Image (cartoon, grey):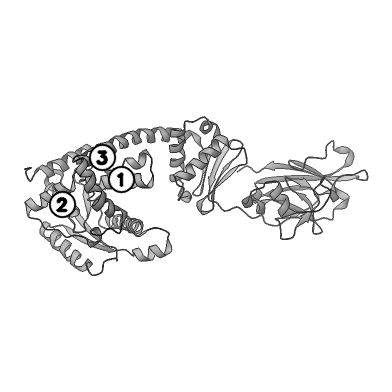
Amino acid sequence: METKNNLIEKVQHTMRKYSMLSHSDRVLVGLSGGPDSVCLLTVLERLKPEFDLHLSAVYIDHGLRPDETPYEIEFCRDLCGSLDVSLSTKHVDVKSLLKNKSVNKQEAARELRFNAFNETAYEVKTNKIALGHNADDQAETILMRIFRGTGPSGLSGIPPVRKNIIRPLIEIERTEIERFLENEGIAFIIDSSNLGDEYSRNKIRHLIMPVIKKMNMDFIKTISRTSEIFREEDRYFEMLVTKILMKMISRKTDKAIELFLTPMEAMDTVLLRRVLRRAIDETKGLRGIGLIHIEDIMNLIKSGKSGDRVYLPGDMRAIKSYAILIITSEKPHKLGTYTLESQGEIVLKESSIVLNFRIINIDETDSYGDGKKTAVIDADKLSFPLTIRARMPGDCFYPIGFGKRKKIQDYFVDEKIPREERDSIPLLINNNEIVWVIGCRVDERYKVDKNTKRVLKFEIKPLKT
């Protein structure tokens, strides 16, 4: 039989292995009253002299078990009193979050719980948050991720250390924890929500894990070692990805990131997947892009043409341009209304272009333009000032060379102009008639003909930001 101090020695080994604590750290312990958190608080209290720790604890009330919560708080208060540890209590409203966000109950509870941990750590001035996840939790988490579908990062499991969060029991099995508490005569309580099979984790814990352990008694140790290998490999790849991304980002905002295409087009799939995942994860406005969407983006990079795009959840999209991949959740800009005189320069910021224009004699121009970068229009058919605006319902024009009237909506569809860009395409208007779909095509009625004496010549330049 193991001695009662074996567990403490193993926890010490884990903490040194992952550099969890420094001398004189102030540690906030997440305390629920269950065996894991009770064991964690007890062990850290016994290690106080070695590390000169300052301990405090917090109980999080999720508002889901009102009949049990008062007893649990009282239990945690008595335990902390016996150890001379201060206890805070926090209430989080899981039900309200469930109404406002499309997440399940466990995800909502986890999000609010971590917010409460960080809030309490700030209030009581602690620099570390200690949580009671154990080796069984690690194994269950990895199995859950395998069932849902995951990559190497998911198989690395629960990190022993992440920023200010430490998990000293992450290499200790649940049976070891329960044996330690029994040998020490330390009481704990059981959360009733852990007893049923309502949640996926509980089904794995109660139905699948017992079968696996019968097949392999060392399964928990085996999967813990496997997750450690994946974490080490993941750290290596993440360092590599960091170096690559530093050279690849063209522009980044809270809602968009632009990446140079050339290196990605030749990049190995394994590395490209990680580069995209990291770029997206670090852009606040791109939450909700999953593995299947990453595959779609990679296909766009490898096989798509300039102008092709992939539509992603929540109005996000990935756009392949000539040299840049744009992943964005920014809402397209709708063009404002501008007035145009006979000569000058105008900036159309929503369309990211600058228009230079002037009236010249017909014999001063050697080209009638293509309607895309340049355009030449019969000036004597115009009544100044002209208007530049976005499309409106019912807009029609006579595309040059087409021979008949066409709805602007149909023209945009036929030209494969993306939906989100259509409201930023500027239209040059003369007496309520479309003269030019700027950057696309001139109207047949305003083209230069044999009677033209003067022309209004346009040049389009990109707006430099």
Are there few (<14), some (14-19), or many (20+) residues within 10 Å of tag 3?
many
The residue type indicated by label 2 comes to Cys
Residue 187 as seen in the image, left or right of residue 326? left
Cα–Cα span, label 3 and label 2? 22 Å
Q: Quadrant of the C terminus?
A: top right
Lower sequence index among marks 3 and 2:
2
Residue name at image x 43 percent, y 45 percent: 281
Residue name at image x 29 percent, y 34 percent: 229
Determine if residue 22 is in view.
no
Lower sequence index among marks 1 and 2:
2
- Does the residue at mark 3 contact the one at mark 2 (Cβ under 8 Å)? no
Determine if residue 8 is in view.
yes
The residue type indicated by label 1 comes to Leu
Are there few (<14), some (14-19), or many (20+) residues within 10 Å of tag 1?
many
Q: Circle 2 is placed at which residue position?
A: 39
Q: Circle 1 is placed at which residue position?
A: 143
Q: Circle 3 is placed at which residue position?
A: 223
Are there few (<14), some (14-19), or many (20+) residues within 10 Å of tag 2?
many
Dot 1: what SS? helix
